[in-house]
Every structure is written in structure tokens, then in C-alpha cells.
Image (cartoon, helix red, strand yellow):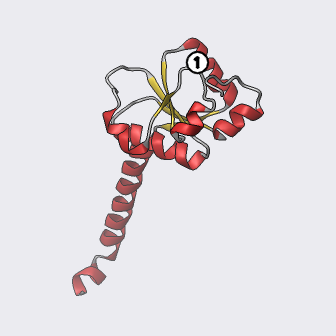
Amino acid sequence: MEFISNNIILFIALAILVLLIINLETKSLFGKVQKLSCDELTRLLNSSKINLIDFRTKEEFNSGHIITAQNLRFEDIDKLDTKNNNAFVAYANTDSDALKGAKQFSKLGIQQVFYLEGGIKSWIENNMPLTGED
């Protein structure tokens, strides 16, 4: 205990360094995920090859989804082909579900990861088209 009290500045510096490293690692793991507005997603769909992933239920997906979207369950993410260098965009009913999927993409090492802010509700409220509607 005497060693700690004699070297308090050293221990404070060590604690700060550890916190900075934890912060940096957390950001590198989750900091790659960016949100997209409906307009930004539309521009991305029109200008790039992307993997658009719908994390809603199969029934919700079949009742209407964004064109080119694939339906995927969270537990099946590891089965997804991630070899192409295309961006991955996740959406769901809620931002938290879309962000959950996007973070899993980021953990797989995918460099360009996005989620649709406001989810499918935002897409519909902005009068954007759906396909596969019953």
C-alpha cells in the first residue's frame, strides 16, 4: 500500500491509459457503424452495390420490403457471404434492432456498415417504394 501512495501519479496515469485503451477498442469495434437517412440510402442504392439486410420477421418482410433487400435472422448472420467488398446496410422495425445487426456485421470485419435511421417506418413515412407487398 505504501508503494501505491508513494507513486499515486504513476497509478493515476496507468488508470487513464487503461481507460483510453478500452475506449479506443470499443470505438474500433462499434465505431464503424454509421446511420443513413432515407435519402442517403436511396443515393447509395442508386450508385453502389450494397448488401441490404432486413432484420424483421419473414412475415413482415413478405408484406413489403425495400427492393434488393434480403431477409435475415440475427442468429444467421455468420452464414452470410461477406466476401464481397460491398457495403452492408441493416434495417428493421426499430433502430436498436438495425443497430444490433449492423454491429454484428462490423464484428465480422466488414468495413462499410450502415443502418437505416428510423427503420422501415421512416422509409414508409417518406413515401419510399416497397416491393413484395401482399
Q: In this rendering, is residue 121 above or below 40?
A: below
Q: In this rendering, is residue 5 above or below 71?
A: below
Residue 113 is situated, as x and y percent measured from the top left of the image, at: 47, 33
Residue 63 is situated, as x and y percent measured from the top left of the image, at: 62, 32
* Within-10-Å neighbours for mark 1: few <14, some 14–19, many 20+: some
Residue type for callout 1: Leu
The answer to whether residue 131 shows anywhere in this view is: yes
Task: State the residue lying farthest toward the top.
Answer: 47
- Which residue does the image show at 63% across and 22% down from the upper left? 131
Is residue 44 rendered to the left or right of residue 80?
right
The answer to whether residue 31 shows anywhere in this view is: no
Residue 1 is situated, as x and y percent measured from the top left of the image, at: 24, 87
Query: Is label 1 in a helix, a strand or a loop?
Result: helix
- Which residue does the image show at 24% across and 87% down from the upper left? 2
Residue 64 is situated, as x and y percent measured from the top left of the image, at: 63, 30
Q: Nearer the viewer, residue 17 or 58?
A: 58
- Which residue does the image show at 77% across and 27% down from the upper left? 127
Q: Nearer the viewer, residue 40 or 67?
A: 67
Is residue 50 rendered to the left or right of residue 66?
left
Q: Nearer the viewer, residue 24 or 103?
A: 103
- Residue matched to label 1: 45
Q: Nearer the viewer, residue 26 or 86?
A: 86
